[in-house]
Amino acid sequence: MFHKVKTVRPLAEYTLLVDFMTGERKHYYILPLLSRFDTFRTLTQIKGLFEQVKVGAGGYGVSRNDEVDLSCSELYENGVSI
């Protein structure tokens, strides 16, 4: 089952506030990905890139450019409910 993303908002310290179509809301922490994946390091190297996050087509994830995407499943399963 897909937990589609309704809205996403960048917060301080590389955290995303994600609202899902189900009404659930979660924080998703990007910091652990910065040390594990080169692609995500660009979020710290290109000023303003992290803040450009948007909901992808159909709510199946979030994106900033063609390389720094996160699926709705990743956001839901590894996000922290608030």
Image: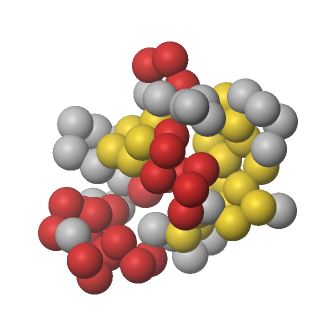
Colouring mode (rainbow / by chain / secondary structure / one colour) = secondary structure
Residue at 56% of width from left, 76% of height from top? 13
Does 68 sit above or below residue 57?
A: below
Task: From the viewer's perspective, tell me whether residue 50 is left or right of residue 66.
Answer: right
Looking at the rendering, in which quadrant would you find the C terminus? bottom right
Give the x, y percent position of residue 75. Answer: 53, 52
Judged left or right of residue 11, residue 40 is: left
- Dividing the picture into quadrants, the one containing residue 69 is top left
Could you tell me which residue is drawn at 25 percent across and 77 percent down? 36
Observer-nearest of 49 and 2? 2
Locate residue 1, reporting x and y percent: 56, 31
Q: Is 6 situated left or right of 68 in this image? A: right
Q: Is residue 1 above or below residue 44?
A: above
Residue visible at 69% across and 66% down? 80
Residue 43 seen in render: yes
Is residue 52 something one can see in this rendering?
A: no
Residue 49 locus on image (x, y percent) = 37, 53
69 to 60, vertically: above or below: below
Q: Residue furthest front?
A: 1
